Amino acid sequence: MRRTRVAALMLAALCLVSAAPPADDIKKHPECIYCGMDREKFGYSRMLIRYDDGTEVPTCSIHCTGIDLALHPHKGVRASLVGDYNTRVLLDAEKAFWVLGGDRMGVMSLRGKWAFGDRKDAEAFLKEHGGSVVSYDEVMKATFQDMYEILRPLCEECPSRT
Amino acid sequence: MNQGGWQTAWTSARSDRHDVLCPKKEDRLRTPLVSMVLAALLLIGAAPGGIGEDIRDHPDCPICGMDRQQYAHSRMLIDYQEGPVGTCSIHCTAADIAVNRHKRVRGIFVADYSGRQLIPATMAFWVIGGNRSGVMTQRAKWAFENKADAQAFIREHGGSLANFDEAVKATFEDMYADIKAVRERGRKQKARGMR
């Protein structure tokens, strides 16, 4: 009886979560400007970059954010925000606890890159899924390293030039 | 969390590109005659025209806006099936291909550092590093048509010999630091202008 009541409560909580209205940034920018993916569906990895010139760029992931930074190297970044993996609340990406790797497949990249506002949440994720806690600079560097995988097939059989 | 869609599309795009640029050994140059015709087409017709013709058609890099005439020694040309794109460097080439992963790459060309003519990037002798400032990067990446020229450059300026794959890998390794450096330079220039 008690178990049924707990299950019912959990179901109700899940319904409430899924019925929660999308965050403001998702309402304003429902899709990633690069890959077109649904930012509500990928709310746990979405990002929002605010540039000094007042423009903002919504993406589905740090991969697409990296692309935007590469395409606009001259633009100063005022704020980099990322969805908390658990709560989906937007966090300051530079202050977040990032988990790189683990057994959960990433978004737009095989290697996962997840952000947590609370170190305990990051460590709980690590225990269950593996990976390592890194800084924003390190995870961004890894993002670009992983982009090499896109070009690798173009030169997999490059002649040895050494 | 359905993540299969982007992955399938990516794998398919990668596979297409790989087939075009790196055909399987058994498919490669099935007969000498076909290979000779292909080589001639590449050199005469299908390849970018004379030296500088691509600069006339693509005067500015679409990523950073830099003048491709000024950076003729590092410029590149991506021959997408959807239309060619001319960049200033391997840095901007990598960025352009990363964003346009859905496009079909038919060929990638790079300027010979010494002669400025475009050559297939996969066939070039690349030099990574050395004391010459790179283009859009702190660690330079230069391409040479002839190994002797690359070795002469290394004797004079340092750096190490590499192939295209290694140059691309180094480009992505350096990319975030290079973006931050460009951003920092812009910030300093702006601050100087405001004084």
Image: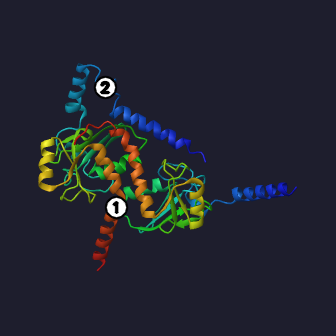
Q: Which disc number belongs to residue B161?
A: none
Residue A157's quadrant in the figure? top left
Q: Nearer the viewer, residue B118 or A153?
A: A153
Q: Earlier in the sequence, mark 2 or mark 1?
A: 2
Q: Quadrant of residue A69?
A: bottom left
Neighbour tally class for label 2: few under 14, some 14-19, many 20 plus, Cα within 10 Å = few
Q: Residue placed at 31% from the left, 78% from the top?
A: B194
Assign the C terminus of chain B to one quadrant of the image. Answer: bottom left
Question: Front-most of A89 and B128?
Answer: B128
What residue did someone put label 2 on? B28
Label 1 secondary element: helix
Residue B177's label in the rendered image is 1
Q: CA distance from mark 2 to mark 1?
A: 39 Å
Q: In the rendering, at what x and y percent does residue A46 appear?
A: 54, 57
Q: Is residue A37 in sight in this rendering?
A: yes
**Chain on which label 2 sits:** B
Q: Amino acid at mark 1?
A: Ala
Can you tell which quarter of the image residue A161 is in?
A: top left
**Which residue is at the far right?**
A1
Q: Nearer the viewer, residue A42 or A138?
A: A138
Q: Could you tell me the amino acid type at mark 2?
A: Arg
The image shows residue B185, relative to residue A156, as above or below, that is: below
The x and y percentages for residue A93 are: 49, 65
